[in-house]
């Protein structure tokens, strides 16, 4: 029986690379995005052209009903949920100094990045607990956090706080679900070249060139996908871990 992987925020960038890699690893894939399917049909067609069996769900992880809709759609399409990758997330609409950050921006970013991840994990975990184990375990949950969980950036404090929250909820769920046969991991991407980072690309290019960053190059969405793929493999059948993406590679730290 094939495993089923839900990947939130997977119509582009890091999420799409993860969905593609897990599909190539042999999983059925549930692509989740906030826009209607026709807006992301090209991405869906690309997966199908690779022989990946996939379903599309339009839903917002920041919304209670949206989260339940994702799990229900996965069950309707494939009958079970084996992998959840919480990738969906947003940056502040405006980078503002910590002393000028608005409550509206804070609520939006934390509501999607932290609350959305918290309760999407809860919904998927409850389904995983109800189903029979597959290949020795009931499921794997991977939260895509950020190096900003531990690196201060005072012009986007709400984002840093939201990702630090993802780190803690990963630890909490890893503790709670280990006895249920469900592994919970975190991937912390570093400086990854995506549309989210396009506005600061020239700035970071200059810093990398001048040696102001402790990295040699931009990371890629595939680097993150490779880390997620490793965490979902049978290599980690009995362990929980915390992966941090560094300079296009990844290093493990145990929770």
Image (cartoon, rainbow, N blue to C red):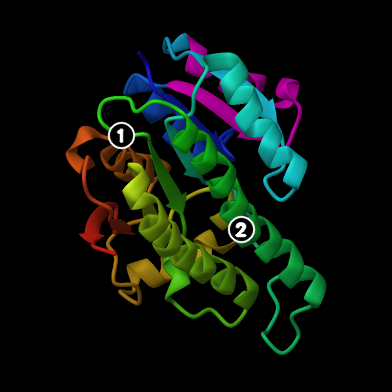
How many residues crowd around disc 1 within 10 Å: few (fewer than 14), some, or many (20 or more)? some
Residue 32 lies in quadrant:
top right
Q: Position of residue 77 (x, y in %)?
A: 58, 15
Sooner in the amino-acid sequence: mark 1 or mark 2: 2
Q: What numbered label is drawn on residue 168?
A: none
| Disc 2 target residue | 113
Can residue 101 be seen in this snapshot?
yes
CA gap between label 1 and label 2 equals 27 Å
Q: Residue furthest left?
A: 235
Question: Relative to 47, does residue 174 appear above or below in the rendering?
Answer: below
Q: Position of residue 89 (x, y in %)?
A: 60, 53
Residue at 51% x, 32% y is 6
Label 2: few (<14), some (14–19) or many (≥20) C-alpha neighbours in 10 Å: many
Residue at 51% x, 59% y: name it: 201
Position of residue 133 measured from the top left corner of the image (x, y, whole percent): 34, 28
Query: Is 118 within the magenta?
Result: no
Report whether 10 appears left or right of 207: right
Q: In this orientation, does residue 14 appear?
A: no
- Viewer-nearest of discs 1 and 2: 1
Q: Quadrant of the N terminus?
A: top left
Look at the picture and state if 255 lies above or below 24.
below
Helix, strand or loop at label 2? It is: helix
- Quarter holding the C terminus is bottom left
Q: What secondary structure is marked by label 1? A: loop
Residue 217 at x, y percent in the picture: 32, 57
Nearer to me, 121 or 31:
121
> 244 above or below 101?
above
Read off the magenta span.
28-48
Q: Which residue is mark 1?
A: 137
Above or below, 64 against 24 in this view is below
């Amino acid at each position: 029986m094939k495993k089923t992987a839900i990947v939130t925020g997977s119509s582009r960038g890091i999420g799409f690379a993860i969905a593609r890699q897990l599909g190539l690893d042999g999983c059925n894939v549930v692509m989740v995005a906030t826009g209607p399917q026709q807006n992301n049909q090209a991405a869906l067609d690309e997966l199908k052209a690779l022989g990946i069996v996939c379903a599309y769900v339009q839903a917002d992880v920041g919304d209670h009903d949206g989260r339940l809709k994702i799990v229900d759609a996965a069950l309707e399409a494939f009958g079970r949920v084996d992998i959840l990758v919480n990738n969906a997330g947003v940056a502040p609409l405006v980078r503002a100094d910590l002393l000028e950050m608005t409550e509206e921006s804070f609520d939006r970013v934390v509501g999607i990045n932290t609350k959305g991840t918290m309760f999407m994990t809860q919904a998927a975990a409850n389904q995983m607990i109800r189903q029979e184990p597959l290949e020795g375990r009931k499921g794997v949950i991977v939260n895509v956090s950020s190096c900003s969980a531990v690196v201060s950036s005072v012009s986007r404090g709400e984002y840093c706080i939201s990702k630090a929250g993802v780190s803690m909820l990963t630890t909490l769920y890893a503790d709670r679900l280990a006895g249920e046969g469900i592994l919970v991991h975190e991937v912390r991407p570093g400086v990854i070249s995506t549309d989210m980072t396009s506005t600061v690309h020239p700035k970071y290019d200059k810093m990398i060139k001048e040696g102001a960053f402790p990295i040699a190059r931009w990371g890629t969405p595939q680097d993150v996908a490779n880390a997620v793929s490793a965490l979902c493999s049978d290599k980690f059948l009995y362990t929980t871990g915390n992966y941090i993406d560094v300079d296009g590679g990844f290093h493990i730290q145990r929770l």
